[in-house]
Amino acid sequence: MAKVSNKKYLLGLTVALLPFLFYMITKSMSKDKIDLPDYYVVDGIDTVEEDGETYYDSIYHKVADITLTNQLGEEVSVNKDLSDKIVVVNFMFTTCPTICPKLTGNITMLQKAFKKNDTTVHLVSVTVDPETDSFQALRSYSEQYNVDHDHWWFLTGDRDKIYNYARNELRVVMGKGGEGVEDFIHTQKLVLLDKERHIRGYYDGLDTVDLSRCADDIILLTLEKKRKRRK
């Protein structure tokens, strides 16, 4: 019990100190003394000739768009409608009796942490059981957690589209799984996407210390300038 209490205390402390963290991180960045979140998933190497010199730069995976229906019954596009947002994505389903209730409960801490700066980040929870989870079911579920519908979407839609997005775009599940109804994703990972839709972090959504790390990384990304070509 002490360990759990300590984790909750650490996350609560991070939330309380967010304004101070913004100040300290901004101050550090002005001195070029800060490490930004890494880029994940390299798709290749780009070679460019510029001013008589050859530059080699990693081509980082860009997550493709997905259009689904949110808990309000609206068709929404993650990339187009949230083009100016940092996005945190997770997967869940409303009838989950194990990790999903705790996972969703933990994500409410992120919602609380960025309540005063909720234009920065948008939370996205995607059901892996769309046959059961209609948008009405997702709305009912989300309201149990006092979700701010303007800044946290619960999405449903075509099953194949969702599973392709999880596996091939967010890379949260590498195996093929089973076939048909036996093909089922159940992950506790949170995936952090920057405004250009590069993957910038994976976090254990059941670990409040890791959730604090996610909050810190979101702050860093709000202060990041466009990535320069590296020689």
Image (cartoon, rainbow, N blue to C red):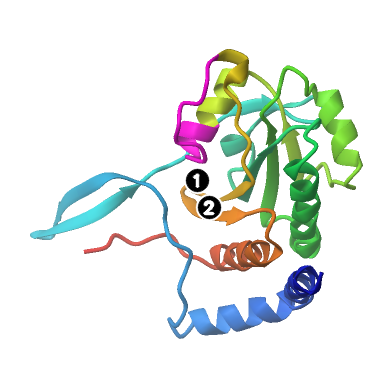
Does the magenta run of residues contain 154?
no
In the displayed structure, 86 sits above or below 209; it is above
Q: Which residue is mark 2?
A: 194
The image quadrant that residue 210 belongs to is bottom right
Q: Is residue 23 visible?
A: yes
Seen at 57% across and 65% down, the residue is 217
In the displayed structure, 226 sits above or below 189; it is below
Q: Is residue 64 visible?
A: no
Q: Is residue 73 left or right of residue 169?
A: right
* Residue 207 place in picture, x, y as percent: 68, 60
Residue density around tag 1, few if under 14, some if 14–19, many if 20 or more, within 10 Å: many
Q: Which residue is mark 1?
A: 197
Mark 1 residue type: Arg
Q: Which range is magenta?
A: 166-179
Seen at 52% across and 83% down, the residue is 28
In the displayed structure, 29 sits above or below 179; it is below
Q: Is residue 90 left or right of residue 38?
A: right
Mark 2 residue type: Asp
* Residue 159 place in picture, x, y as percent: 62, 20
- Prevailing SS of the magenta stretch: loop
Circle 1: element type: loop
Mark number, residue 175: none
Numbered marks: total: 2
Seen at 82% across and 69% down, the residue is 1
